[in-house]
């Protein structure tokens, strides 16, 4: 863009926002040393081409590992560009003042240099656009924090403008080499050491789904940075997450449940009685681990004369069910009543129904139980396809194979799933399902007598 100062044309161009911190400039201003507009346009076009080439080089340099050392050379080139000695004689350029006579040059006051803008670091971007955002949910904050923490452990903090495809690919490869038990136990090992341990001991590694979740959290953060022109592009998209080791979770077999029930409990952070209670509730309700651990005493109520668990949000600590459909009523199975679940409302200390559980630093009640369960499962030789979530698979499979007259929509409501049958009747006119029908559904869950031998409270 051309500007006139006194009798001389100048070239002015704004530096792209993503490059300002790297080049330490917001704009480029060069005297064209001519008063002729046509000549000024010719010279401006040359400078425009040079600055375009400089910007492209800067973009490419920011994607390289040694970006900081390479950028200094580009800054020198920029200073040389701004002090370029263009021809100024009338013979060479035909320079004629815009207005004659040429006034004496005025002494210009030196303007104070603007302080260099500090580059936006990954840790700062996490805090600014996720952790401090009033629009981000607790789950989003927790999951994004976890993904960023893993990246910082592996590569350290860095300006978001220099994190490109190479680093994203290296992070993806690292995730695929980490053990599936990462984060479920205390460890002083680095991520590289954890990956080496997984290779040497032949441990199961993170699934493609887990790797994808971490990458997608970073991608969502980068989408915000890209919209604000703080980065050139999003390097976290377009990756493949198939590693040939996809594990499909399945239901428990009777022998596996018997093995779990007879196994000795070694955890010191969670009482064995709590472990037995939680697995029993999961097996006879299909509720998620987090839903069981979050139950309050007031969540055990009689509805239409039937004892029920109420899975619902808790405003005091911000806990809420996984989805809107997960807010539901689950009748208490007769086996749970027989085991003494109803008495917990009067015997357990504190507000929660399930005793013996602590809330983690991340605000998750039952996190220690989840880790202890995974370690127990591995120790007794259960396959990777079996997880705590397999109780939901088992209940769902049993109910769909039951001889009783149970409707599919009752099963979905009991488990907190969106209705699988999307007819007009289920989506528009079905407003509630009677507690009696839900009780009929829950009573269809049964196990052999050899299972849950220690399942008393």
Image (cartoon, rainbow, N blue to C red):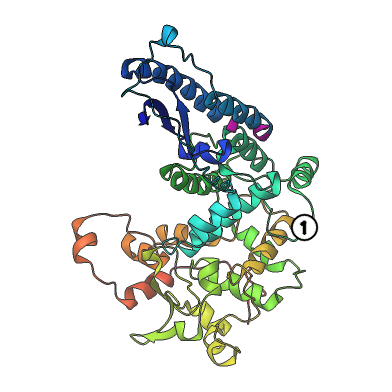
Q: Where are the magenta residues, as a range?
A: 61-68
The picture places residue 425, in percent across and down from the top left corner, at 20, 60
Residue 96 vertical placement versus 29 (above, below):
above
The picture places residue 261, in percent across and down from the top left corner, at 67, 68
**Residue count near mark 1 (Cα–Cα under 10 Å), binned few <14, some 14–19, many ≥20:** few
> What residue is rendered at 42% in x and 11% in y?
90
Closer to the camera in the image, 393 or 41 = 41
Left or right relative to 435: residue 57: right
Residue 88 vertical placement versus 191 (above, below):
above
Q: Is residue 404 visible?
A: no
Which residue carries the number 1 mark?
Answer: 187
Q: Which image quarter: residue 75?
A: top right
- Magenta region includes residue 317: no
Q: Quadrant of the N terminus?
A: top left
Q: Quadrant of the C terminus?
A: bottom right
> What residue is rendered at 33% in x and 85% in y?
304
> What residue is rendered at 41% in x and 27% in y?
10
């Amino acid at each position: 863009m051309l500007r006139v100062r006194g009798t001389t044309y100048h070239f002015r161009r704004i530096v792209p926002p993503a490059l300002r911190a790297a080049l330490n400039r917001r704009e480029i201003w060069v005297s064209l040393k001519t008063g002729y507009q046509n000549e000024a346009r010719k010279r401006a076009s040359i400078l425009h081409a040079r600055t375009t080439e400089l910007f492209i080089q800067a973009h490419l340099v920011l994607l390289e590992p040694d970006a900081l050392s390479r950028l200094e050379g580009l800054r020198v080139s920029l200073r040389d560009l701004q002090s370029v000695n263009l021809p100024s004689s009338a013979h060479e350029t035909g320079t004629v003042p815009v207005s004659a006579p040429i006034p004496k040059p005025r002494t210009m006051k030196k303007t104070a240099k603007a302080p260099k803008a500090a580059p936006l670091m990954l840790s700062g971007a996490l805090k600014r656009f996720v952790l401090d955002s009033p629009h981000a949910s607790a789950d989003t904050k927790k999951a994004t924090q976890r993904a960023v923490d893993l990246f910082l452990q592996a590569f350290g903090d860095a300006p978001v403008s220099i994190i490109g495809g190479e680093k994203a690919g290296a992070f993806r490869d690292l995730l695929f080499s980490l053990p599936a038990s990462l984060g479920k136990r205390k460890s002083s090992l680095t991520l590289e050491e954890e990956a080496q341990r997984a290779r040497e001991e032949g441990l199961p590694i993170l699934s493609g789904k887990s790797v994808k979740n971490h990458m997608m959290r970073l991608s969502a953060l980068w989408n915000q940075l890209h919209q604000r022109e703080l980065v050139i592009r999003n390097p976290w998209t377009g990756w493949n997450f198939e590693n040939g080791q996809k594990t499909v979770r399945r239901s428990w077999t009777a022998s596996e449940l018997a093995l779990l029930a007879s196994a000795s409990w070694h955890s010191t952070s969670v009482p064995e009685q709590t472990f037995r209670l939680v697995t029993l509730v999961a097996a006879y309700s299909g509720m998620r681990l987090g839903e069981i651990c979050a139950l309050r005493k007031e969540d055990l109520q009689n509805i239409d004369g039937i004892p029920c668990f109420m899975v619902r949000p808790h405003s005091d600590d911000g806990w809420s069910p996984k989805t809107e459909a997960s807010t539901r009523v689950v009748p208490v199975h007769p086996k749970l009543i027989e085991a003494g679940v109803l008495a917990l409302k009067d015997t357990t200390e504190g507000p929660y129904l399930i005793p013996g559980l602590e809330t983690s630093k991340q605000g998750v009640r039952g996190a220690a139980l989840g880790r202890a369960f995974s370690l127990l499962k591995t120790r007794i030789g259960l396959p990777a396809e079996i997880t705590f979530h397999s109780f939901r698979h088992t209940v769902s499979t049993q109910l769909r194979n039951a001889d009783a007259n149970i409707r599919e929509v009752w099963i979905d409501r009991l488990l907190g799933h969106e209705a699988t049958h999307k007819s007009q009747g289920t989506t528009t006119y079905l407003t509630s399902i009677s507690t009696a029908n839900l009780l009929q559904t829950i009573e269809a869950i049964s196990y052999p007598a050899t299972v849950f031998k220690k399942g008393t409270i």
